[in-house]
């Protein structure tokens, strides 16, 4: 077993946790609207928890599905193209660097990368209307599953890295841990949500987070590893 595999899961979780500012901007609004649409009364907290968990597990499930499809494609490419691994690793490193630059608010070039998924989202986004307004957990789950295909630079950055995993299963698990890392911010309510948003909007926090993502992207680039041999 490749020892780097053991490090990939907590690293993916950390990327999701640190990058969840991006998630709040992309998915936070729809997640908050699920709670606001619920009638306040007896059992409100239980219904709220069910709705939020269903939506987010649907979203994370889509990440796992996309990672599985990407890993299958990358495995096929690697079997037919000897340099596919180097190309994929380079792409993953560049995407992480782009995401770090965006998080640090130095450069927003990741937005150009997000346009890659726009055609798919254009076909899927009209389907979300079928599940609005959300009245039960099943609708929230389906809405989250669709929302997981929303073009997102942070998701694409992690997908590029997941494609480097040695098996399809490990690629799927990488995205699962990434998705779990985004949960705290997406589920937080009340004072905790305000505290998290305040922390993530802090300039120093964003720059440190962006710097860490850039360093991780540089570490992913293959030429640094080749230089060490």
Image (tube, rainbow, N blue to C red):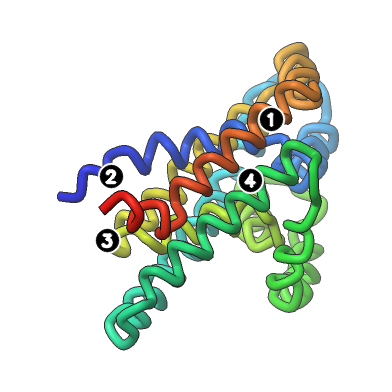
- Residue at the disc numbered 4: 55
Left/right placement of residue 139 relative to residue 181 reads right
Q: CA distance from mark 1 to mark 3?
A: 39 Å
The furthest residue to the bottom: 80
Q: Earlier in the sequence, mark 1 or mark 3?
A: 1
Dot 2 and dot 4 residues touching (CB under 8 Å)? no
What's the residue at 70%, 72% (across, down)?
A: 116
Dot 1 and dot 3 residues touching (CB under 8 Å)? no
- Residue at the disc numbered 1: 48
Which is in the foreground here, disc 3 or disc 2? 2
Q: Name the one closer to the observer, 98 or 32.
A: 98
- Residue at the disc numbered 3: 166
Q: Residues within 10 Å of mark 1 (few under 14, many from 20)?
A: many
Which is in the foreground here, disc 2 or disc 4? 2
Left/right placement of residue 38 relative to residue 218 reads right
Q: How many numbered circles are shown?
A: 4
Tell me where residue 178 appears, x and y as whole percent: 50, 43
Q: Residues within 10 Å of mark 2 (few under 14, many from 20)?
A: few
- Residue at the disc numbered 2: 4
Q: Earlier in the sequence, mark 2 or mark 4?
A: 2
Q: Earlier in the sequence, mark 3 or mark 2?
A: 2
Q: Quadrant of residue 103?
A: top right
Tell me where residue 19 appears, x and y as whole percent: 64, 38
Q: Name the one closer to the observer, 129 or 56.
A: 56
The furthest residue to the left: 1
């Amino acid at each position: 077993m490749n020892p780097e595999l053991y490090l990939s899961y907590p690293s993916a979780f950390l990327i999701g946790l640190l990058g969840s500012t991006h998630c709040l901007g992309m998915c936070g609004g729809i997640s908050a609207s699920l709670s606001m649409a619920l009638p306040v009364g007896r059992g409100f907290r239980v219904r709220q928890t069910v709705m939020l968990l269903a939506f987010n597990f649907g979203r994370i499930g889509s990440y796992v599905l996309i990672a599985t499809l990407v890993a299958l494609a990358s495995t096929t490419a690697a079997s037919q193209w000897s340099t596919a691994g180097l190309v994929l690793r380079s792409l993953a490193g560049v995407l992480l660097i782009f995401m770090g630059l965006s998080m640090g608010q130095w450069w927003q070039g990741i937005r150009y990368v997000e346009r890659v998924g726009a055609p798919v989202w254009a076909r899927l986004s009209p389907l979300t209307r079928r599940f609005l307004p959300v009245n039960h957990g099943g609708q929230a789950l389906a809405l989250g599953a669709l929302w997981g295909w929303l073009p997102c630079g942070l998701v694409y950055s992690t997908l590029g890295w997941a494609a480097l995993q040695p098996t399809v299963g490990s690629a799927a698990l990488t995205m699962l841990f990434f998705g779990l890392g985004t949960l705290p911010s997406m589920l937080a309510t009340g004072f905790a949500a305000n505290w998290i948003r305040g922390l993530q909007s802090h300039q120093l926090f964003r720059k440190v987070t962006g710097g860490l993502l850039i360093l991780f992207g540089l570490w992913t680039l293959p030429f640094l590893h080749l230089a060490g041999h």
